[in-house]
Amino acid sequence: MRNERLRQEMKAREGELRALRQQQQPAPCLPCEHVQENGRLQERLAQLQREVEEARAKLGELDLEVQQKTNRLAEVELRLKDSLAEKAQEEERLSRRLRDSQETIASLKAQPPQVKWVLLTVVESSKAKQALCESQSRNQYLQEQVGMQRQVLKEMEQQLQSSQKTAAQLRAQIMLYEAELERAHGQMLEEMQAMEDEKNRAIEEAFSRAQVEMKAVHENLAGVRTNLLTLQPALRTLTNDYNSLKRQVRDFPLLLQETLRSARSEIGQAIEEVNSANRELLRKYRRELQLRKKCHNELVRLKGNIRVFGRVRPITKEDGVGAEAASAVTFDPDDDAVLHLSHKGKQVSFELDKVFPPKATQEDVFREVQALVTSCIDGYNVCIFAYGQTGAGKTYTMEGTAANPGINQRALQLLFAEVRSKAADWDYAITVSVAEIYNEALRDLLGKEPQEKLEIKLCPDGSGQLYVPGLTEFRVQSVEDINKVRRDEPLRVGTLHMW
Ligand SMILES: Nc1ncnc2c1ncn2[C@@H]1O[C@H](COP(=O)(O)OP(=O)(O)OP(=O)(O)O)[C@@H](O)[C@H]1O
């Protein structure tokens, strides 16, 4: 009963396992840890099934063994029964023969007195003699018969005794057989009980293991289900995204071809436009270049290649006091190119390209030279330098102050502004070098060895240009870069070279 119940429970668990496996099968999802966990659970289920199969096979073997032993026992019992029946029949037959013999003996014992009387009467006549002879012979025969019967009786008694002995032996043997049978039966029952116990134990162990595993499987399955439920929206979103991406990928070559075609035509059109614009710009540039060169040449022709400006600074307390200090320099109100200097009572006049009076501002001075800066950008060499006695205002004019910068700062601002405005069409490289000529010696003020004397040489390209081999150059991108270089080594001379 218990085995049957366990079998039914095992069948029910197997059914649950199959149902779980079927539930797990249709979940082809993305490769994730749940799939791996499913794989592990399936392996575990397969292992449990194998264990159940093994237990079932073992149970079948035990059943077979019990069946064989039961059959053997039934055979032995049957043989014993047959043997007992045979013995009982033999005993019955012998008893019957013994009874017959005893009856025969008893009947023979009852006959003798009649025979003796007949013998006496027969002696008197021949007939009697004959009868006597016959009786005698008959008597003889009967006696022989009696002897024979006695012999038979004796034999039968012996046979009976031997049969009784055999029956006793058989009974003892039967008892032995019965005892042995009982013992074998008990042993068999014990073995059957042990096997039954072992089988039950194995089934219970397998069942409890299966229950534990089933519980774990259920828990894992619940977790997997929960994860699947939480993953389903994400999976749906991913599937939608994937489908939309697939559509995009499918349509992409067409879209790409279309886009490339339109881009090509746009680019071709743009290139054509740019080319025509470039051609137009080039034409304009060449025209402007020619115009500028013409202007420059005109300027040079009109103003001369070398221009000399005079600037009279305001009177300071270092100039002394008095009328002489105040009236040392006078101007012609009608000509800004003439300067009169009073020297020892005589007036000396100087004619220059332009004279800046004390009231002239830094902007006024720079306006006069700023065309030279643009000439520098156009490829002409320009040199602006200040000359004068100590305190004449060279540094003020060239460098100026932070609040009121001079030619240098303004020229650099203009230079970089011009370069920036042309940056789309031109590449400019601006470098800074600072050199000093003092007592006929040329020194590199930005070099590592400022005391080292350098030389001025003619360019070997035959252009007639001068250059200083080994002069340190710094590439600069802005006015601030130049000022930084100059902060490290301030210009000692108020001179600006551009080339
Ligand atoms: N146009 C001007 N307006 C106002 N102040 C000026 C002007 N020119 C020069 N000064 C002032 O005169 C003084 C001397 O000028 P500055 O130092 O420029 O002379 P310098 O020629 O460079 O002298 P040095 O050769 O000795 O260096 C300075 O205080 C300067 O501010």
Image: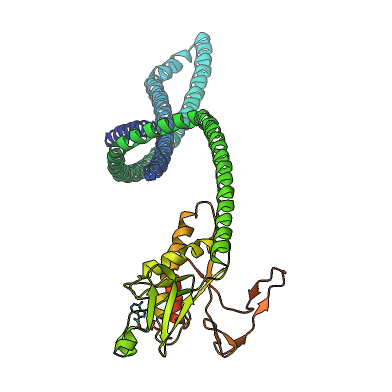
Q: Is residue 358 left or right of residue 283?
A: left
Q: In which quadrant will I find the C terminus? A: bottom right
Tell me if 347 is positioned left or right of 291 in this view. Answer: left
Answer above or below: position of 432 versus 490. above
Residue 198 to residue 116: above or below: below
Q: Quadrant of ligand 1?
A: bottom left
Q: Percent position (x, y) of residue 119?
A: 45, 17
Q: Is residue 169 visible?
A: no
**With 433 as the anchor, is 67 left or right in this view?**
left
Q: In this view of the protein, which residue sits in the foreground, 396 or 353? A: 353
The x and y percentages for residue 231 are: 31, 39
In depth, the one of 159 and 483 nearer the eye is 483
- Which residue is drawn at the image coordinates 54% and 87% (left, top)? 450
Q: Residue 299's x, y, as percent?
A: 54, 61
> For the view shown, which residue lies furthest in the top direction?
127
Tell me the colour scheme of the image.
Answer: rainbow
